[in-house]
Image: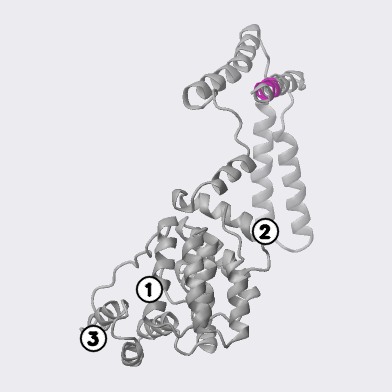
């Protein structure tokens, strides 16, 4: 607090000095000098120069010359008066120089928090890392995850979680940057390309922009069955006027989804809505906000999907890593045991599972 009040005093003195200094400069300026006279003389010279270069006609030169000369004569007859600081004006300036810092201090005491100690970012970050992730809001979670990505620059998973937190904070551009970093580390992961496409759609106010479509195409190159990429690319076709082609893609996607897939009702409703024909357009709605509880919900959703469709080795790796990042050791060990038993004959998957289980939790 001592440093704060010293800084306030220095800034207040600087403001007062600036006010008095400028007033002294104005008082010391030569009296009776008129800055308009040199301006009109310069205009006359410029008119003559333009005429000599042939850029204005002779009659235009005479007209412009006459107008500038008239203004010059008028300014010479009524010169601009200088500023003379009388005693009352001097007292007013001193009073203004003193009132400015006092008013700023009063405003701070009313709306500020002078009783609070300093809160350095490093100290707040340490407190957030010590808290359970579900107790953090989206900006706090993003700050924690940025520190995690700095500690584990070679791991794409913290960047993926960071993108979710950035999106929940209302910053899709930052989410897209985080996903690009994750993709740089793991370009073969279709889910990262899908997430990047969705972040780019958020930047485009919900539209399937060319950049988003390119990301979805890259997702399909890695996984031809990537459901989100197929859905959004078909939606882009519908938005572009290729309604029948887009509906055909949606129906094909619906046929490929398992009967118990929770996305089926959403897709069926979308197909029925488009099949009814055009309606008055409304502004695109933003996607749902995703905070720390929703991150846990996403992990739970992945676990539920693997319980129904367990033949997904990379899904098990992601699930184990997600539990490790969240600090849920019991769920991590349970998922790891199931995955190890299922892929006991695959050394590569076992190695990936071990690496995922060793991921440090967010602190």
Circle nearer the N terminus (1, 3): 3
Q: Position of residue 249 (x, y in %)?
A: 36, 90
Query: Foreground mark, 3 or 2?
Result: 2
Residue at point 43%, 61% (across, down):
296
Q: Please state the horizontal and vertical placement of residue 88, each as a whole percent of the image.
A: 61, 8
Residue 123 visible at all:
yes
Q: Is residue 191 visible?
A: no
Mark 3–mark 2 distance (CA, rounded to whole Å):
48 Å
Query: Residue at 54% of width from left, 63% of height from top?
Result: 324
Of badges 1 and 3, nearer the viewer stands: 1
Give the residue at the far top of this rendering. 87
- Residue 93 left/right relative to 325: right
Comparing 55 with 20, the one in front is 20
Magenta region: which residues?
5-14
Q: Name which residue lies at 40% across and 67% down.
A: 300
Residue 150: mark in rendering: 2
Q: Nearer the viewer, residue 120 or 356?
A: 356
* Residue named by callout 3: 275
């Amino acid at each position: 607090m001592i440093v704060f009040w010293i800084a306030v005093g220095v800034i207040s003195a600087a403001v007062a000095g600036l006010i008095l200094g400028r007033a002294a400069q104005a008082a010391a300026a030569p009296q009776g000098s008129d800055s308009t006279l040199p301006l009109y003389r310069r205009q006359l010279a410029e008119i003559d120069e333009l005429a000599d270069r042939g850029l204005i006609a002779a009659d235009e030169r005479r007209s412009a010359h006459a107008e500038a000369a008239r203004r010059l004569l008028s300014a010479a007859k009524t010169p601009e008066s200088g500023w003379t600081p009388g005693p009352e004006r001097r007292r007013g300036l001193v009073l203004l120089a003193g009132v400015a810092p006092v008013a700023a201090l009063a405003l701070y005491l009313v709306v500020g928090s002078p009783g609070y100690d300093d809160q350095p970012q490093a100290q707040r970050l340490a407190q957030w890392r010590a808290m359970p992730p579900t107790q953090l809001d989206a900006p706090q979670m993003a700050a924690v995850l940025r520190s995690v990505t700095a500690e584990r620059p070679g791991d794409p998973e913290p960047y993926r979680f960071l993108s979710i937190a950035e999106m929940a904070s209302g910053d899709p551009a930052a989410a897209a940057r985080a996903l690009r970093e994750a993709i740089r580390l793991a370009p073969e992961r279709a889910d990262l390309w899908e997430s990047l496409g969705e972040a780019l759609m958020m930047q485009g106010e919900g539209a399937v922009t060319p950049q988003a479509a390119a990301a979805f195409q890259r997702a399909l190159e890695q996984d031809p069955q990537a459901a989100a990429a197929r859905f959004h690319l078909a939606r882009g076709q519908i938005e572009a006027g290729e309604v029948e082609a887009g509906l055909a893609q949606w129906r094909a996607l619906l046929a490929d989804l398992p009967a118990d897939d929770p996305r089926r009702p959403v897709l069926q409703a979308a197909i029925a809505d488009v099949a009814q024909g055009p309606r008055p357009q409304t502004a695109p709605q933003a996607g749902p906000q995703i905070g720390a509880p929703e991150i846990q919900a996403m992990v739970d959703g992945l676990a539920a999907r693997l319980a129904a469709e367990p033949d997904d080795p990379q899904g098990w790796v992601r699930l184990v890593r997600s539990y490790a990042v969240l600090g849920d050791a019991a769920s991590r060990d349970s998922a790891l045991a199931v995955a190890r038993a299922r892929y006991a004959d695959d050394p590569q998957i076992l190695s990936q599972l071990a690496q995922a289980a060793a991921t440090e939790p967010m602190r």
